[in-house]
Image (cartoon, coloured by chain):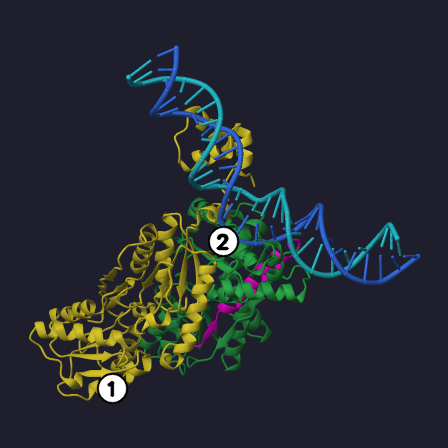
Chain colours: A yellow, B green, C cyan, D blue
Amino acid sequence: MATMRDVAELAGVSTATVSHVVNGTKKLSPETTERVLMAIAQANYTPNTLAKSLRSGQTHTIGVLVEDIRGLPVAGIVSGINETLSKSGYKMILHDLHLLEKLYNQYEQIGAYRQRINNGVSLLQASNVDGIIYVGMHDRHLDYLFDPMDTPLVFAYSHGTKEDTYVTYSNDESAADMTRYLISKGHERIAVIAGHPHSYPTARRMHGIQMALQQAGLVLPEAYIQYGDWEYESGVEKTRELLCIHPRPTAIFAMNDLMAAGCMRVLNEAGLKIPQDMAVVGFDNREIARYLQPPLTTIALPTTEIGVQAALHIMEMIHNPAKAPEKEIIHCSIVERESV
Amino acid sequence: MATMRDVAELAGVSTATVSHVVNGTKKLSPETTERVLMAIAQANYTPNTLAKSLRSGQTHTIGVLVEDIRGLPVAGIVSGINETLSKSGYKMILHDLHLLEKLYNQYEQIGAYRQRINNGVSLLQASNVDGIIYVGMHDRHLDYLFDPMDTPLVFAYSHGTKEDTYVTYSNDESAADMTRYLISKGHERIAVIAGHPHSYPTARRMHGIQMALQQAGLVLPEAYIQYGDWEYESGVEKTRELLCIHPRPTAIFAMNDLMAAGCMRVLNEAGLKIPQDMAVVGFDNREIARYLQPPLTTIALPTTEIGVQAALHIMEMIHNPAKAPEKEIIHCSIVERESV
DNA sequence: CCTCCAAAGTTAAACGTTTTTCTTATTATA
DNA sequence: TATAATAAGAAAAACGTTTAACTTTGGAGG
């Protein structure tokens, strides 16, 4: 590899001069500039990133900490991050925490979580990253898991405390939108298969649904609310319960696509036509939603957009370290298919 | 951040000595070692990776080039790579080529492909990675897309030419295994919904099926072979054709889960019970396979294992650059569910 | 009593940049 | 004409390590 010194000799100037033409840090005579440029081309010179970083203290590298890359929305977010960073000449060190298995018995494992996260952070900091993006789930008191640090940090998807910068999606509004959509289609008896009763998304989505219902002058009877656990099985179970109620609801809002799938199966088995006898909607827009019979109308998580925004935020923070924390909530869109 | 010089002063030795105790590169007296260790602890010293790399020429960083992180097996492979690299103190720069959209009209786009790939490679090389892992699809003459280079390179999932190191999974054997499995369940009339007629996996899997059939003394009539395009729709279409044939097959082997899903839908609509009236199997073990009615028996891609092995290989190649190329083909396992 | 060698450290030169300070030459100002 | 100001570039000191080459000391061997 050609070094700056080689170029300098070739052009008959000092390395300082070469540096200045490369970075445009000083005004130089056109002739010299030209000579240096020629020499650069001739030597096929590329600056050595390591030396540059060592000297300048900036690596143009962002550390991305993911709870588990195999987790559903994660890949999309990472994709958005990567695309955006690339465009600005940043690169990305990805570190996977492999936390997928332990998602629901989290509270017992808070210590293990903390350790893995701090390990990850240390690892990234040892790599001299300019900033860190944490990509993870909701519903956990993330701030307690992070030791304080001076590296700029943004949360993507998940969110920390008031003092952190994060970008997430809107639970309330999306659920409200979907509810309004169902109402606009003539439904007045809308039942809900919720997620884990004490989880953050369940509470927020529930709130959105209630809001929209209330605005339309409708009520949501207690019996119409069934709490599941986000899994397929709970979708089937809760739907069975729902079918026993009189008057029977005309639409079921499952808080994720997996439970919606379970729901549709039961409806099928009961000989109910979707959407004629019962409308079903989900949340997440997993791949499975496209392939259900009929294809499921659901809410698409704006994963790429979350990644894009997170990347934009971290770059801003690096540029301006005194910046106040910002919270960004991205709106989800409804994917209309044939289940309502 | 404390530097080596700080530690040296604290311990009253030279930086060389500190370096030697940190790296164990020279025998030193126990007392000195002890003093240095104390000083390191006291100063909370961590070596500066950039300086280390600049001096030694090794970054302990692997560049991972993925065609699209949102693509199906990719996340699993990346997960395996990351896990393995981490254990050996390597880190990973991930670069996403965003090639997902153009997957099937590839041949026209060979130039664009080449450019994006070489951009990615340059980007990684500019980051001084010690090696590169390319994670991508089959069925493309990858070697033509890569400019020659001196950085160690291994292909994961996809594979290059004879001269490259790659790790992939076994198409032939897996398809043969599944065929034998069907035969062992008493099926003698097995139909196939294949993938794209000219694609590599189609050819290999077809070969495996024929092998197994032949060994069992069975034949595969021309009419029992339908070529689709890997998509759900072609699964429904081809199944319809299959149902018109007499004698009707008793089992359908779809070459991926999406087509299997389409197939099952048609079977359902035709009032045929799965697996009593017709057995169905797929390939890939996508998430969707678990949630079909009945759950689909299919072949699981060993994604994590591919990643693990790719990581192992690249580290070996870095350690020993003169190593001869190796090809590793990992066996897939059958996931038994209820569709046969 | 020399000489040699090993042991335990130190010195200093790299690695390839950036950037502050310094030099020299030219032009503008009084 | 003398002087200051500016322009264009060079020198050299960093950034934090590693490592080859050197020094010093203390024994061992003859």
- Whether residue B174 is situated above or below residue A246 in the rendered picture: above
Q: Mark 2: few, some, or many residues within 10 Å (few <14, many ≥20)?
A: some
Residue at horizontal 53 percent and vertical 47 percent from the top? B144
Q: Secondary structure at mark 2?
A: loop
Left or right side of B17 for B50: left
Q: At which x and y percent is residue A102?
A: 40, 77
- Whether residue A126 is situated above or below residue A103 in the rendered picture: above
What residue is pinned by disc 2?
B140
**A104 or A227: nearer the viewer:** A104
Separation of marks 1 and 2 at Cα, in angstroms: 49 Å
What residue is pinned by disc 1?
A240
Q: At which x and y percent is residue A338?
A: 22, 69
Q: At which x and y percent is residue B165?
A: 59, 57
Q: Give the magenta-colored segment's residue range.
A: B296-322
Residue at horizontal 49 percent and vertical 50 percent from the top? B124
Residue B321 among magenta residues: yes
**A4 or B100: nearer the viewer:** A4
Chain letter of disc 2 in the image: B
Identity of the amino acid at label 2? Answer: Arg
Left or right side of A287 for A93: right
- Is residue B279 shown to the viewer in this render? no
Quarter occupied by residue D7: top left
Identity of the amino acid at label 1? Answer: Arg
Q: Mark 1: few, some, or many residues within 10 Å (few <14, many ≥20)?
A: some
Residue A23 among magenta residues: no
**B282 or A26: nearer the viewer:** A26
The rendered magenta stretch, by its main secondary structure, is classed as helix
Left or right side of A293 for A212: left
Chain letter of disc 1 in the image: A
Q: At which x and y percent is residue B21?
A: 62, 61
Q: Which mark is residue B171?
A: none
Residue farthest left in this picture: A217
